[in-house]
């Protein structure tokens, strides 16, 4: 919740059955990210080895939580019960359960790479450009798809701004969130495109490009502000869903 946003500005304080289902699905996705999935460590060495997965787990948890909180904020601020909104929420549930494995593998590989192999490599066949390109492609498509779901929910809220009787700030925020998540989609697809251009002869810096593209997400705030300003200008033009 932003600094100037209080609980009274939210449309509902209870939890619908759909929201509870989405929350449960995200909670289950988090359990798939646990640091030791095979068995409980039975020695100090095994425990230390399991703890080396903590950085990848923490980063993966943060990414899953980002999408979960985006849906929570949308639900509480706009809470549309239309069929398209319900279908997008259910699609988000499906995608997050697909998303967790490439997310963990990608971030585990990233941390193994930046630590020179001190942190464990999750893939046994990650040598070479093609396996990494496939992983970046899988991840990029999942990331872009989930971002499209969240962006679609905010687009529906923007279209229904008259029916929801949104004030200028709430309507502008919906436009800003849509712009932000549309930008997420573009960044994810750009990573997929670059990954598709990799060959077995690609150099190490070229193999790193699909992952480096995600640093463009640091400019998301600019897109959000631009979307808010556009929404503020268009807000008086009332529109029905």
Image (cartoon, helix red, strand yellow):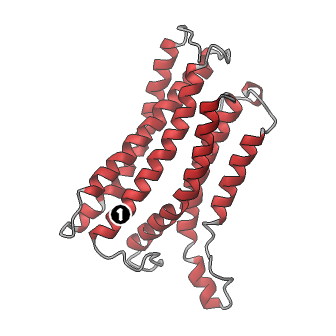
Q: As rendered, which of 175 and 216 lies closer to the eye?
A: 175
Left or right for 224, reference 28: left
Query: Label 1: few (<14), some or many (≥20) within 10 Å?
Result: some
Q: For mark 1, give the secondary structure.
A: helix
Q: In the rendering, at what x and y percent does residue 68 appear?
A: 63, 47
Regarding residue 1, the answer to whether it shows in the image is no
Residue 59 lies, with reference to residue 169, above or below; the image says below
Which quadrant is the N terminus positioned in? Answer: top right
Q: Is residue 15 visible?
A: yes
**The C terminus appears in which quarter of the rendering?**
top right
The residue at 47%/69% (across/down) is 108
Q: Which residue is mark 1?
A: 134
User: Which one is nearer the viewer's eye here, 158 or 98?
Assistant: 98
Q: List x then y, in percent, for residue 153.
A: 57, 33
Q: Is residue 122 left or right of residue 93?
A: left
Callout count: 1
The residue positioned 59% from the left and 31% from the top of the image is 84
Q: Position of residue 186 (x, y in %)?
A: 37, 41
> From this viewpoint, which residue is outermost toward the right?
14
Residue located at (69% from left, 29% from top): 81
Position of residue 79 measured from the top left corner of the image (x, y, whole percent): 69, 30
């Amino acid at each position: 919740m932003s600094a100037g946003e209080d609980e009274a500005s939210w449309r509902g304080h209870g939890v619908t059955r759909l929201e509870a289902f989405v929350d449960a699905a995200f909670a289950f996705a988090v359990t798939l990210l646990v640091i030791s999935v095979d068995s409980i460590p039975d020695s100090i060495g095994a425990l230390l080895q399991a703890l080396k997965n903590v950085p990848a787990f923490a980063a993966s948890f943060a990414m899953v939580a980002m999408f979960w909180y985006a849906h929570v904020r949308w639900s509480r601020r706009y809470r549309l019960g239309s069929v398209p909104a319900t279908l997008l929420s259910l699609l988000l549930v499906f995608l997050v359960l697909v998303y967790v494995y490439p997310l963990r593998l990608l971030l585990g590989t990233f941390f193994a790479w930046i630590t020179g192999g001190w942190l464990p490599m999750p893939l046994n066949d990650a040598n070479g450009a093609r396996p990494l390109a496939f992983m970046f492609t899988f991840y990029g498509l999942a990331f872009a798809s989930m971002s499209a779901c969240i962006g679609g929910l905010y687009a529906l809220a923007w279209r229904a701004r008259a029916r929801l009787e949104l004030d200028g700030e709430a309507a502008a925020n919906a436009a800003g969130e849509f712009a932000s998540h549309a930008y997420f989609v573009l960044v994810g697809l750009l990573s997929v495109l670059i990954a598709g251009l990799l060959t077995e002869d690609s150099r190490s810096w070229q193999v790193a490009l699909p992952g480096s593209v995600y640093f463009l997400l640091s400019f998301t705030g600019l897109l959000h502000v631009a979307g808010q300003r556009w929404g503020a200008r268009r807000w008086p033009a009332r529109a029905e869903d």
